Amino acid sequence: MSTNHRRIILDCDPGRDDALAIAMALASSAEIEIAGITTVAGNVPLEVTHRNARFLCELCGFPETPVHAGAARPVVGAPVTATRHHGESGLEGVEVTTPVAPVESHGAVEFMADTLQAGANGEITIVAVGPLTNVALLALEHPGLVAKVREIVVMGGASQAGGNVTPAAEFNVYADPHAAGIVLDCGRPITIHGLDVTHQVLATPAHVERLADAGGEVARRLAPLLRPAQGSRGERFGPDRSPIHDPCTIAWLLRPELFRTEEVPVACETDGTYTHGATVVDWWGVTGEEPNARWVTEADGEAVLDLLIERIARL
């Protein structure tokens, strides 16, 4: 297997930007083999994220891709959703139809464990673009199997950019900070795409038009997902400009040279009136802790969007 080839489990909570990440990964089969998709409660409740993932696989022409339902609530506390931004369907702007494929009987964590057990060491990369509940439960229940993971690529967290749920916390981590802490401590290589980098990948109306015109029905139907979500803060990014979060993880697998990273210690705050769910990045080494993550600091935003459009246009 080529060192550039990845066999992945895509753990997600679709979600508008999750949908773009799923489509981008499915369109990149020469470089990315999707062993399966696992779903988690996050942007919308679990039954909706699970339906959306199955719908997207069918829309993109990959109905055989297994989709396994995972955690319906965080490790600790009550579920948090982002329907205000993603709509009740989770895919605001896209007409969602009921998937035809039957629901998989195995749950997400069982599927992850079975896939890791059957594979070689370093064969599987976990790409997690929702709350980290499923990955944390895997680490708690099957620590020996987590040791076989090549890399965990995360969309979540924020440092210098500030949060998008609270002044300190990004949504995916805020929705299950205890899970994020477990994953950060699991001992595997972790690459984190937080708001610091995803706010550099800004789609404009020109990108929406390019995607709509680039390919066939899939590109046309998914193009609205590049528009700003409901309730977006246009004053921060400029009118009609929308940060594209989750596809950064797939772009990283395909073209890592489009990004700059720094090895740093990262911890997750699970308490605090103002800091619950904050990802604390030790930029200056003041804690004396060894780095436990590769934090993505910069991206060539226009090149990432070009890659996204080019891939989805293939479908």
Image: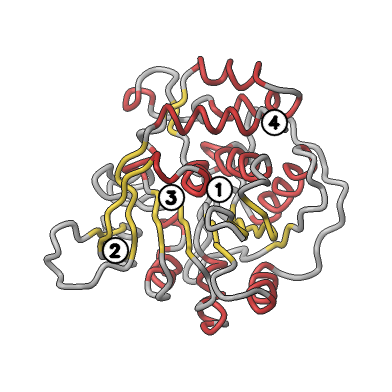
Does label 3 or label 4 sit earlier along the sequence? 3
- State the mark number for residue 171: 3
Q: CA distance from mark 1 to mark 4?
A: 27 Å
**Rendered residue at 46%/20% (across/down):** 204
Q: Amino acid at mark 4?
A: Arg
Q: Is residue 40 visible?
A: no
**Rendered residue at 60%/36% (across/down):** 87
Q: Amino acid at mark 1?
A: Asn
Q: Is residue 281 visible?
A: yes
**Is the Cβ of the residue at disc 1 closer than 8 Å to that at disc 4?**
no
Q: Label 2: which residue?
A: 266
x, y percent for residue 83:
56, 42
Q: Is residue 156 above or below residue 244?
A: below
- Choose top left, top right, bottom left or bottom right for residue 291: bottom left
Q: Label 4: which residue?
A: 314
**Is the Cβ of the residue at disc 3 closer than 8 Å to that at disc 2?**
no
- State the mark number for residue 43: 1
**Rendered residue at 68%/26% (across/down):** 219
Q: Closer to the camera, 109 or 171? A: 109
Classify 10 Å Cα crowding around label 3: few (below 14), some (14-19), many (20 and above): many
SS under mark 4: loop
Does label 2 or label 1 sit earlier along the sequence? 1
- Choose top left, top right, bottom left or bottom right for residue 224: top right
Q: CA distance from mark 3 to mark 2?
A: 17 Å
Q: CA distance from mark 1 to mark 3?
A: 9 Å
Q: CA distance from mark 2 to mark 4?
A: 37 Å
Does label 2 or label 4 sit earlier along the sequence? 2
Q: Amino acid at mark 3?
A: Phe
Q: Quadrant of the C terminus?
A: top right
Q: CA distance from mark 2 to mark 1?
A: 24 Å
x, y percent for residue 110:
68, 75
